[in-house]
Amino acid sequence: MFMSSPAEWHVDLLEIAQKCVYCGYCSLCPTFKELKWETYHPRGILEQIRMYFSEGVKESVQVEVSKSLFEAIFACTMCKACENICLVDLPLLKVWEQVRQEAFRKGRWNPLLLSLYNKVKSTHNIYGLPTEERLAWANLAGMNMSRRTKKKAPLAFFVGCQASYSGKMGNVAPSVVKILRKTKVNFTILGLDEWCCGSPVFLAGGYSAGRDFAKHNLDQLKELGVERIVTACSGCYRAFKIVYPRVLGEKWDIEVLHITELAEELIKNGKLKLKHSIKEKITFKDPCELVRHCGLVEAPREVIKQIPNVRFEELPSNKHEALCCGGGGLLKLNDSDLVNQVNSRLVSEIKYTEAEIVANGCPTCKDTILTGVKNDNLDVEVLDISELIVRAMEGEK
Amino acid sequence: MTLKKNTRISFTRHLGKNFKDDYTTLQVYSRDMADLPKLVKPFIGNVPDGVIQVRTKEDMQKIYEIANETKVPITQRGGGTAGFGGSVPYKKGIVVDTKGLEYHFLVDPLELTVTINPSVVFSDLQRQLNLEGFSLCSYPSSFHSATVGGWIAHGGYGVGSIQYGGAKEQIAALEVVLPTGEIKRFTDDTELSLFVGSHGTLGTITEVALKIKFDIPLKHQGCTFDSPAELLKGLKYLAEIEPFSIWFLNPDHVALFNELFGYNLPLSYLAIISKEVSFEEEEKEFNTLFNNAIRSSGGQILDRRYINDIWDFRFKGFTLIGDSPDYLVTEVILPIETSDKFVRKLVSRFRGKIHLEGEMVSPTHYALLIYLLFEEKLSEIKKTILTLKLYNVTTRKTKAKGIPYSTGLWFSGYYSRIYGKEQYKQYLEFKRKVDPKNISNPGKVISPKIRFLPIIKLKPIVKLASKMML
Ligand SMILES: Cc1cc2nc3c(=O)[nH]c(=O)nc-3n(C[C@H](O)[C@H](O)[C@H](O)COP(=O)(O)OP(=O)(O)OC[C@H]3O[C@@H](n4cnc5c(N)ncnc54)[C@H](O)[C@@H]3O)c2cc1C
Ligand code: SF4
Ligand code: SF4
């Protein structure tokens, strides 16, 4: 199978690698900070790209370099911190994705990654679970979603694989539904016809395969007359906001909202009222895919600000400088110890704020932070922001 | 792999997976910010035989022990950002990457010091200090990538140096593993001086007690000058108001700002002056002093709209060169009093190509970062020629009395020009005592003999070649 990215997304790897001025600013890379070898430093990866893709490079050298290059490329969480700080604005994320594709072409994916890739392709969810279980979250929450499933509506709630299937995310989807119901928003869900947004496939560099996912979801949404889509998952959000327009072009004309953006809008037009105070001190972890990939900064803060008497403290590294939780870029499949190492820096920052609740807007962050605070015996509640909104809306734990 | 089998075994036995010598790792560690011109590489053993992530000072003792036994040179590397080749091996051997050193962070609020591992990057350290209400005093503009140890060993200056001094003035104490294997703590000023700018040739810094200050907000002002002469006159007046920083750009560099950000800054010499200001009265006083200084020196006050944006760009000078197909960079330290002619000549010699960024490093001297930007990719020969020409311009004994910024590989042999003959004597004495086999970063400070041509030294070659090219 051949994987490719759309032409306009394609970059000349060698040219970009040669443009690096070697300033080293990208040493803030969360995984380089742990692994410390220069071969994992983004500029070191570019140096390896220079060696690997140079004209006339000997095959033996290419094989040798590829060992270290492909290892480094899959140690990346795709947090985009390097691209954001790059002194000469190199499009590093595109570079990392293309190198992952090269690894695929060379049959050099880690088996777990390959298995995820195949699972997503055959079952349309990241867990390889039966499609029939996609609505299990609603049953478990005692919610009857039949009136909302595949109905014509201007807004669709895209649940996402993690909120649909993972027990740890059990409250996320019901919370979003509670917000939508309470504010009388006319919405629909795709139910069993919802496919994974394709994020893991795109992250692994699989554009041709990912395009099928994008096309399927678009067709479903169009059938229902959907004009806006809301999600509580930053991975789905990024896919819809950045990748779908790339792979579907102008056909993708659906407005994409994160739950915090919708909540902010509903608060502004008086439909959503956060009446109940939350006595615990709150902090917010900006998910990389929201803040650095998509530039979403203010909406979560605007929403949290509306909680009566809220005690909110920013993490020391916040907004565009937020630390990565370690869970992105499919790193869990490549090196779960490294995820924990990266995560421990975030946990120290959470500790520093003395917050009792850490809110976030991404199931992957939630999952990773949950593990981190458990490992650290830290007494802090980890909530998706939709759960926090419901708590302030309904006043109960 | 050119390490002898037994030597390699010694390293791997003691350092385990912290020793690597695969092809890719060795290549990646064969350069720092400024890659060596291809034509020069054959004369320099810049590709190491092995790389070690040193974790503890005991590791470092062991490394020196093996290095002494086997006469394998070691080269320390911090962030690899110095661009003078200090962290690039000259005679192959082992690169010791300090990034792996154990983490320390201990603030002494009474003494106003922080004790840290030397591999900490400035921006990380500043963030941690700010969280506790403190701040670094002076730091390089490679804030996001340089390590504290690298900056000290390279003998740097930076933002805040006009008020708080350069790397040397920031140090309260250093713990060093000497090439003899002895671990020693230095607090005496004369001894500390020896480790500043000596590029690890006297040992490896494993702990630093750095002076810190309370985190006081900065206020910025900006002004412009029509000529280098006016700029230098202005700098003299501005230095008298005891600022935290004075940073300036030449008109070509300002033009890039305009182009990149859609600004409409006047195409003159532009300076941004910053001062620590704790309360309103101080700010008023700063404004008055600033206005007086500008009036006396014949400058113009810059539209305030731009000032904060330009200051925020403080650490991003390189962004401006991003689109150039090729470029060369070097840095020199100059006295304000005597450098007018030098700057004028420099600008006219490289007209249209030259971009200057200056930072006052003391009330009388400034560091001048010189970028040459080219509209086409340079051939290797041309690049080598221009590199030598640029080095010649910055090292020549001009009436400007300029000095190279640091020694490293490129300016090795210039130590006494920078630090004086007396200090060089002390340096040599210390070096003989602690590193008789010259295994700690050879080729730096003391001018090396070119490999394959062992009778010719690098310094005269650079000089000769550059004379021929000019
Ligand atoms: C964008 C940019 C801006 C810059 N601005 C400035 C500036 O304002 N001021 C300035 O001075 N420089 C500046 N530089 C140059 C450089 O970043 C600094 O000099 C920096 O301090 C070097 O630190 P490093 O950790 O990268 O050191 P490296 O380049 O890794 O090493 C420098 C020297 O120190 C030695 N060394 C490293 N660690 C140790 C140790 N633990 N013990 C003993 N020896 C050691 C190395 O062998 C080498 O000789 C700039 C560079 C860039 C890219
Ligand atoms: S995207 Fe994040 S993890 Fe990946 S190389 Fe860049 S900084 Fe490192
Ligand atoms: S920040 Fe950009 S230019 Fe600087 S070293 Fe990293 S990739 Fe290269």
Image (spheres, coloured by chain):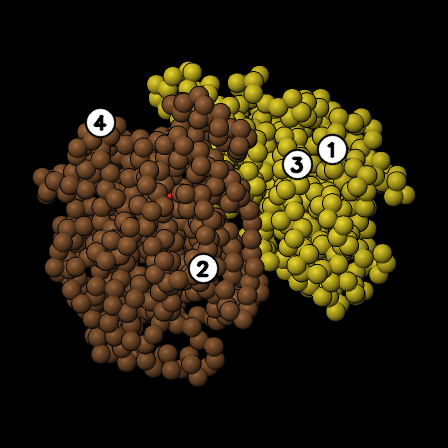
Chain colours: A yellow, B brown
- Are both tags, 3 and 4, on one chain? no
Residue at 32 percent of width and 80 percent of height: B289
The residue identified by callout 2 is B173
Pointers 1 and 3 in contact (C-beta within 8 Å): no
Q: Crowding near pointer 2: few (<14 within 10 Å), some, many (20+)?
A: some
Q: How crowded is mark 1: few (under 14 residues within 10 Å), some or many (20 or more)?
A: many
Residue nearer the viewer, B438 or B22? B438
Question: Which of marks 4 and 2 precedes in the sequence?
Answer: 2
Q: Name the residue under label 3.
A: A337
Q: Can residue A83 be seen in this view?
A: no
Position in image of residue B71 (x %, y %): 36, 32
What is the spatial separation of the Cα atoms under label 3 and label 4, in whole angstroms? 47 Å
The residue to which callout 1 is attached is A194
Q: Do labels 4 and 1 share a chain?
A: no
Chain under callout 4: B
Which of the two residues, A172 or B3, is positioned nearer the viewer here?
Answer: B3
